[in-house]
Image: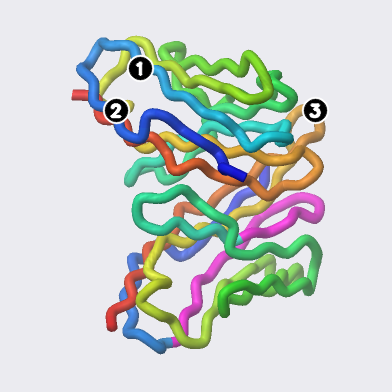
Amino acid sequence: GNSVTQMEGPVTLSEEAFLTINCTYTATGYPSLFWYVQYPGEGLQLLLKATKADDKGSNKGFEATYRKETTSFHLEKGSVQVSDSAVYFCALSDLTQGGSEKLVFGKGMKLTVNP
Amino acid sequence: DAGVIQSPRHEVTEMGQEVTLRCKPISGHNSLFWYRQTMMRGLELLIYFNNNVPIDDSGMPEDRFSAKMPNASFSTLKIQPSEPRDSAVYFCASSWTSRNIQYFGAGTRLSVL
């Protein structure tokens, strides 16, 4: 089945630093790719997504580009803030029995941003 | 929209007791997912329903775990008997089948002593 490998961290950065979180995937077909974020004490929420090769997802200053040639979907932000401290999950879609889709998540990476 | 609602938010129980976790999905969503999150194993999909029917339960750890979805607005995850290794945060998520964005509840933190 499809799988995702991402940086696990934890990572600590200073405010305004540049952030890259690597994510690579193994998949048959053309899955959709996602980044989810989990703030302390909360459930996961969608940060951004891309549905086909060369698509760029963006939200809240974060960006990720679907790279089919390198099977990657790296998350970047040019200047992180303290409020970006969270756990970040890379995920891709996978077909279940019956043709519906489920998500396969990476292990998550904890980011702490210090003032 | 109230989002996905889970209850209770926290549950502390003793080994051997029955535990029931509850989930109300977003109205209009027809897919529902139960996940377990631990430090050691990360986020694991336990079971997935589509139109109230269990589609994939390959992630359910063992027979002590069971899940039901009697109608489109309610699901339960039951552990009987509970064991300390079941301690985790359990998340419920819902989505439209034709769209693959999942919306997560705030989770239930379970501690089995």
In 3D space, how far apart are the residues under numbered discs 1 and 2 (Cα atoms)?
Answer: 8 Å
- Is residue A13 depicted above or below A49 in this figure? below
User: What chain letter is assigned to the residue under label 3?
Assistant: A
Chain letter belonging to callout 2: B
At x 70%, y 19%, the residue is B53
What amino acid is found at the position of numbered circle 3 in the picture?
Answer: Gly
Residue behind mark 3: A98
Is disc 1 surrounded by few (<14), some (14 to 19) or many (20+) residues within 10 Å? some
* Residue type pointed to by label 1: Val
Q: Give the mark toward the camera: 3 or 1.
A: 1
Badge 2 amino acid: Glu
In the image, farthest residue toward the front: B1
* Quadrant of the image containing the N terminus of chain B: top right
Q: Is residue B19 magenta?
A: no
Residue B19: image tag: 1
Front residue of A16 and A27: A16
